[in-house]
Image: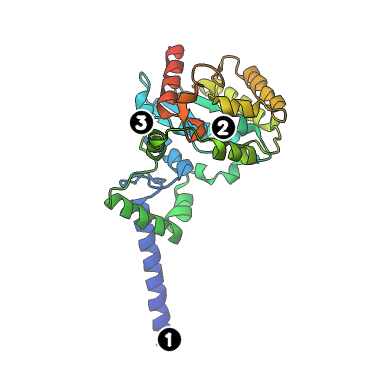
Amino acid sequence: MKKIFLIITFSTAVSIYILVGIFNYYIDPFSVFGNNKIGVHFSSEREYKMSGAIGYSHDSILLGSSKVANINPSQIKDVKVFNAAFSAATPEEMYFFINEFVKKNEIVFLGLDFYMFNEFSFPLKNKEEMQFLNKSFYFLLYKYAFSLNLLKLSLRGLRRHLTNQPVSIFPNGQRNTSKDDTLDLESRDENYDRILDKLKEINFNKYKFSYSRLEYLKKIKMLSEERGFRLVVFLNPLHPEVLNLVKSEDLLTFFELFLNESKKIFPNLADFTQGKYSKREYFYKHDPYHYKPEIGARMIQDLVLQKN
């Protein structure tokens, strides 16, 4: 009797485990298997960008930080862009992503930021730490499908879909910026203190310049030459308040090093840190760190026209 009970209990547990895997596989809340039909309702940029780079039809890829992730590819003409950018991206992550997913004759629009070279706040990563780059079907099954935590997200994502809640990431890779857009429209005055304090505390805190990341930029350049894809590099625009911050006494030397070393590696890069895309009105009133999506699209369109 005890043996039968154990067999029934074990069979039931295995059945539930399999059903969880099947449900997660077909709901696919992060779209890591390419099965997602309900939209991505979570901030799972790295996971989604992996599947999008494989499944979304494109001839060009946008890579960079959250600034770039806000750009709407549908506003860029003459190229079919997938936005593969993700928050707090670093050169080594972008190198490994390019190495895995970029093909011959594609175009990579690569956006660089000053924070990316602060190895104190953003420690150097190796490929083993970047599990989102693992395309192995069996790894994905193990990591995602047979997971009770993912089951919760699958159920939550399904509920959000059925109640018509907005997605977090659009199919073309753009982040949903509707909350920021609405807040900007409703704001009368600029309010930058919270974001500027955050930049001081995190992005630019105890700045330790990463020469290792310069080597990853060189690897990206070499990879573009070997594989035969077009590499278009740009430095993201800076709001005047953020520019004043990085030009402060503690950061100026590192900021100039970032500019000079980037230009040595990529002599033809587009430096937008100052100039026509750095006007105050081009940034959110509540966030001087992120330019508005339409400004980013206009900037990339300029690069497309220069390419042609």
The label number, if any, that marks residue 190 in the structure image: none
Q: Quadrant of the N terminus?
A: bottom left
Q: What residue type is labelled 1?
A: Lys
Secondary structure, mark 2, is helix
Which residue is situated farthest in the front direction here? Answer: 188
Task: Report the residue marked by disc 1.
Answer: 2
Nearer-the-camera pick, 16 or 91: 91
* Separation (CA) of disc 1 from disc 2: 57 Å
Mark 3 nearby-residue class (10 Å; few <14, some 14–19, many ≥20): few
| Of callouts 1 and 2, the N-terminal one | 1
Position of 18 relative to 285 (above/below)? below
Nearer-the-camera pick, 278 or 71: 278
Q: What residue type is labelled 3?
A: Ser
119 sits to left or right of 237: right
Q: Residue 128, how many percent across, how many down?
A: 59, 45
Disc 1, disc 2: CB below 8 Å?
A: no
* Separation (CA) of disc 3 from disc 1: 56 Å
Task: Report the residue marked by disc 2.
Answer: 95
Task: Report the residue marked by disc 3.
Answer: 57
Q: Residue at x 40, y 68 (%)?
A: 14
Q: Residue at x 44, y 25 (%)?
A: 296
